Amino acid sequence: MTTGTADLLDLIDDAIAVADPETWELETANAAFWQWLKRPPVSGRLDSLLPELQVPEVQAALAEHGKHVWKASGATERGRLFPAEFTLRRITRNGQAVLALHGRNIVRLAESEMMLKSFTKLIDDNNRVLRRQKQAVSDLLDNMRQAIFMINPRGKVEREFSAYSQTIFGSDRAIAGEHIMALLQLTPEQDPSAHERMSFWLSNIFGGDDLQWLLAEELAIPATTYQRSNGDGTAEARRLELEYAPIYEDDVIVKVMVIVKDVTVLRRLAAEVTDKERQHAEVLQRVSELAGMDPGLFETFLTESGTLIDQGRDALDHLATTPHDTDGIHRLFRALHTLKGNARIFQVTTVQDRAHVAEASCQAVRDGDRALTPEVLAELRNDLGEIESVLAELNRLGGEVLWGAQADGGRRQASGPVVKVPETRVLGLRRAYKDLARLIAGLPVPELAEPLADLAKAVQGLTLVPFGEIVERYRPMIGDLCRDLGKPAAALDVSGAEALLDAKLTDRLGDVFLHALRNALDHGIEAPGDRETAGKTAQGKITISCALADGAVTVEVSDDGRGIDLDQVREIAYRKRFLTEEALEATSETDLLQLLFRPGFSTAAQVTEVSGRGVGMDVIRAAVIDLKGDAVVRSRFGQGTTLRLAIPADYYQRL
């Protein structure tokens, strides 16, 4: 026996020994044999080492059958007795007979068998658990409203996938084996960009590690539109969202799990919810805008806005037949600009924002940057309609927030019940009075003179309001505008507050006051530092006066600001080609200041949210001319500016 074989035998736990069959002399034995006998290796006879072999029956059986098996105890392992099973065989090795002894620990064998059975049972139990878990996962996947499947390195869908996959991609469609690009309809013709991204992603992730996945993760498309067939020849667009999860083996990506969700309905519901929330937010914003507003001011705002809407609509109707008429586009721009300015002054943001959009479109047409096509006209008409709808909603809310609160003890309570009389009835009453006065004038009844005078006074007083009451509506606005402009609140001085004017006239003067005050506060009154340098107080001053004389109403709006630089007016007039250089030399200061009323003329250094678009003075002049009156500007550079309006006092009484 070679040394290599002996070394190999020493590694075996069972006892192995070889002896001569005639002499029973021990030829060799492994380490386990001597360990079992608890003695060092010695020479001698095998039957002397194991007395059981000296029994004649053993030797006879061995001689006759070539094998003998017996059990013995007494050998020790780690200090304890254990039963052993020995097998003695007569075998031939290299043509010679030998006795081969094999002993093994039958306790360890039994334990191994029991352990094997335990392992087998454990494996069976685990297999049953795995089968249940696999079924549970399968049931879970089949009940999830998502398509879940695996794709392999070739980009194809693996055999197993969730049941809902067919709900998304078609009930009669076997998606296993399909390429993910074809499954998601990502073709170069339908969506070249998405097709290119996904192709690059698929070619870079498989076989990579975590870093490779992170680097390529953004290339995988997160969503796509899928055209799903309805089975009746029609198709519907479905919005699909996709998620991806890598599957690793030995830290290398071998598959990718794809989760597809059909979010078509969710998106529609989310859009509806967003729209509802937007509408709710707009209502809340409108209520908040109204909550702090004076009811009288709000009513003035609504009245003036309605008039401006009518002016804008008339201008659009005119432009529909004569689109190249510059006067029509100027009138439309004036109406929109004034509407936006009024909304800003009264802090009605919902109207201001919409008017700003329409004004920007109209300005592009006015400046020649955009053609006045039928489509643009329709767009402007739609913008005007949206503003009108917002105003109608504000009017409805105002009845609940302002006038409802006023009736229940709000900020301003009338001293007595207020009765609203339609204007047509007032005009009818005036005409009836005139007819009655003419009849009585020819009768010699002096006793009727005094009652007739009282009646005339009462009829005329139906629509007369004090001038001061109208001006006071704008006092809060002055503080707000000054705050926005970063200036101290200008002082307001009113004279002629007791003068009685027709309410219809004061309504038409509303736009005039708004633009006049805006120009005075923004362009007239200087910044506090500039005023102090000029030797003035930091606080500016606005003076408004009203006088009735010779059947005319004279209203003046003055400021103690920087005044108007006539040289600047000449430069702008020449640059904008309002006058030639020769005409400018011959123009008086009075006539030169009248150029401020031209559309688009502005001395402002920059356009602000308050003024500067060259519209304010244009609006003032248009309104005054419509009232059969006149407007004049007087100014002294460095000292201030005065706007003087002269209007027939009985203009509306003569209707």
Image (tube, rainbow, N blue to C red):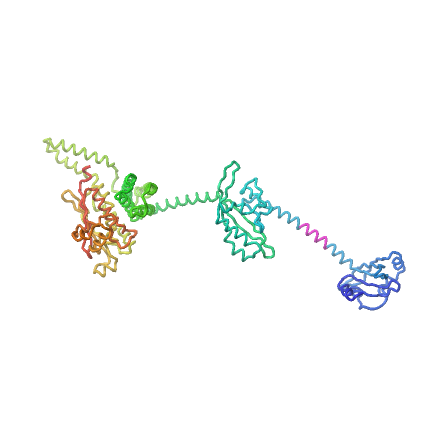
- The reply to whether the magenta stretch includes residue 106 is no
Instruction: Please state the horizontal and vertical placement of residue 508, each as a whole percent of the image.
Output: 23, 43
Q: Residue at (83%, 63%) from the top-left corner?
A: 18
**Considering depth in this image, is 136 or 604 the residue closer to the camera?**
604
Total labels drawn: 0
Please identify the dominant SS of the magenta region.
helix
Instruction: Please state the horizontal and vertical placement of residue 425, each as a whole percent of the image.
Output: 23, 34
User: Can residue 193 be seen in this snapshot?
Assistant: yes
Q: Is 454 above or below relative to 122?
A: above
Q: What stretch is highlighted in magenta?
A: 115-125
The quadrant in which residue 405 appears is: top left
Instruction: Please state the horizontal and vertical placement of residue 256, each as a whole percent of the image.
Output: 56, 51
Left or right of 83 in this view: 479: left
User: Can residue 394 be seen in this snapshot?
Assistant: no
**Considering depth in this image, is 525 or 296 the residue closer to the camera?**
525
Q: Which residue is at the far left?
A: 444
Q: Is 175 above or below relative to 113?
A: above
Instruction: Please state the horizontal and vertical placement of residue 234, each as a whole percent of the image.
Output: 50, 37
Q: Is 653 above or below relative to 195?
A: above
Which quadrant of the rendered structure holds the C terminus?
top left
The quadrant in which residue 382 appears is: top left
Which quadrant of the rendered structure holds the N terminus?
bottom right
**Considering depth in this image, is 377 or 493 the residue closer to the camera?**
377
